[in-house]
Amino acid sequence: MLAGDPAQFCHLLKLAHYYTADEALYTSGVVRCYHQLDAAIPDVEPTGDTSPDERETVPDLGSA
């Protein structure tokens, strides 16, 4: 429902009293950031399955 719709997301946050700023001002900032970040993500087509050795590993930070 909200995937890719930052304006709707901001509206629902306002309805939930998450922020007290003007909704239009808050939304314009979030939408601007969303589009900047979206443009920074390269379009990469999937190359198929990767073997476990080729996958990037993420360290377990919770076990320290």
Image (cartoon, rainbow, N blue to C red):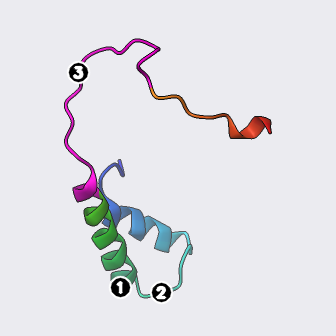
Point 21% across, 36% down: residue = 44
Q: Evaluate if marks 1 and 2 touch, with contact meaning CB atoms under 8 Å apart.
A: yes
Quadrant assignment, res 30: bottom left
Residue designated by label 3: 47
Q: Earlier in the sequence, mark 3 or mark 2?
A: 2
Kindly identify the amino acid type of the residue bearing the numbered disc 3. Answer: Thr
Q: Tell me the quadrant of the picture where the C terminus can be found.
A: top right
Residue designated by label 1: 25
Q: Evaluate if marks 3 and 2 touch, with contact meaning CB atoms under 8 Å apart.
A: no
Q: Give the SS element for disc 1.
A: helix
Is residue 26 placed above or below 42 in the rendered structure? below
Q: Which region of the structure is painted magenta?
A: 38-55
Kindly identify the amino acid type of the residue bearing the numbered disc 2. Answer: Ala
Magenta portion: prevailing SS class? loop
Q: Position of residue 52 (x, y in %)?
A: 46, 14
As drawn, is 53 to the left or to the right of 2? right
Residue designated by label 2: 21
Front-lying residue, 30 or 2: 30
Q: Give the SS element for disc 3.
A: loop
Q: Report how far apart the C-alphas of labels 1 and 2 lie in the structure.
A: 7 Å
